[in-house]
Image: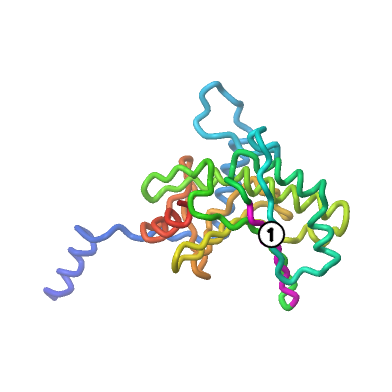
């Protein structure tokens, strides 16, 4: 009886706050609804949140050097992805977001029949790192990068092979023992404007709670994500 009472007291007072739990479906649905609401909100002189990325013009400055890295891609499709017009558009779309070069990993898994387009982030490469306020991380700050990458994918798919439109786009970062993968959400094929509030860390999907200031993660998850984005 005494032990049970003590456990009850510890559970109600002085214990660590519970880890927020949310399913990937719930997290992405909430994030998508918030983005749609932001799109429908009239722009003011002092917006409460940065506008969603809607173009691939980047910062209007110098294009970023693009380096294509292949894994499981045929010679024919290497030619498609290397198209001068498409790569130039990507380079300009990334302007002001990344320091040179942007390493774009283009992969295809013939067993699972899944393709990926991911930019691999090096330490300190982000020109505009996301705001990170404790356990709240503004993943949407990465949207200009993923939007440019999604536009690159769609351009190639429209002109060469429509199946390329199914390639997933995202960002990846290797920091010591940590591997973080940031993906996009939204109606397929996602246009890159919405970062998923779920981050893959060492093969485990970790979802946070979307808020107006960013995505709120469990403390240990937020620590890993901050490390990957620095």
Q: Quadrant of residue 141?
A: top right
Q: Where is residue 30? Give x, y as percent.
A: 55, 49
Colour scheme of this structure image? rainbow
Q: Where is residue 29? Give x, y as percent.
A: 59, 52
Q: Nearer the viewer, residue 141 or 213?
A: 141
Name the residue located 69 percent from the left edge and 42 percent from the top edge. Answer: 93
Residue placed under numbered mark 1 in the picture: 117
- Tag 1, which secondary structure? strand
Q: Residue 104: within the magenta?
A: yes
Q: Is residue 4 above or below residue 55?
A: below
Q: Which residue, as the protein is rendered here, is positioned at the far top? A: 45
Q: Would you say 9 lies left or right of 156 here?
A: left
Name the residue located 14 percent from the left edge and 76 percent from the top edge. Answer: 1
Q: Which residue, as the protein is rendered here, is positioned at the far left? A: 2
Q: Is residue 17 visible?
A: yes
* Predominant secondary structure, magenta span: strand
Q: Which residue, as the protein is rendered here, is positioned at the far bottom? A: 111
Q: Nearer the viewer, residue 73 or 10?
A: 73
Q: Would you say 80 lies left or right of 128 here?
A: right
Q: Where is residue 172? Give x, y as percent.
A: 57, 59
Q: Is residue 212 above or below residue 25?
A: above
Q: Is residue 137 above or below residue 105?
A: above
Q: Residue 194: within the magenta?
A: no
Segment colored magenta: 102-110
Q: Is residue 124 above or below residue 173?
A: above
Number of marks in the image?
A: 1
Name the residue located 73 percent from the left edge and 78 percent from the top edge. Answer: 111
For disc 1, the neighbor class at 10 Å (few under 14, some 14 to 19, many from 20) is many
Q: Would you say 151 lies left or right of 8 here?
A: right
Q: Is residue 27 visible?
A: no
């Amino acid at each position: 009886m005494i032990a049970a009472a003590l456990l009850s007291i510890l559970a109600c007072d002085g214990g660590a706050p519970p880890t927020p739990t949310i399913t990937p479906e719930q997290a992405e649905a909430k994030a998508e609804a918030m983005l749609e609401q932001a799109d429908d909100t009239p722009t003011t002189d002092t917006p409460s949140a940065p506008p969603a990325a809607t173009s691939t013009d980047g910062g209007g400055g110098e294009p970023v050097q693009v380096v294509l890295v292949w894994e499981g891609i045929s010679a024919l499709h290497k030619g498609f992805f290397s198209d001068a017009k498409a790569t130039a558009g990507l380079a300009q779309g990334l302007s002001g977001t990344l320091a040179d070069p942007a390493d774009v990993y283009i992969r295809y898994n013939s067993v699972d029949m899944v393709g990926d387009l991911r930019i691999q982030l090096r330490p300190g490469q982000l020109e505009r790192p996301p705001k990170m306020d404790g356990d709240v991380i503004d993943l949407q700050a990465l949207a200009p990068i993923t939007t440019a990458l999604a536009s690159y994918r769609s351009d190639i798919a429209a002109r060469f092979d429509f199946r390329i439109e199914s390639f997933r786009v995202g960002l990846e970062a290797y920091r010591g023992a940590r591997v973080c993968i940031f993906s996009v959400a939204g109606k397929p094929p996602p246009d890159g404007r919405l970062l998923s509030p779920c981050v893959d860390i060492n093969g485990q999907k970790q979802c946070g709670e979307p808020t107006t200031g960013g995505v709120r993660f469990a403390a240990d998850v937020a620590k890993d994500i901050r490390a990957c984005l620095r």
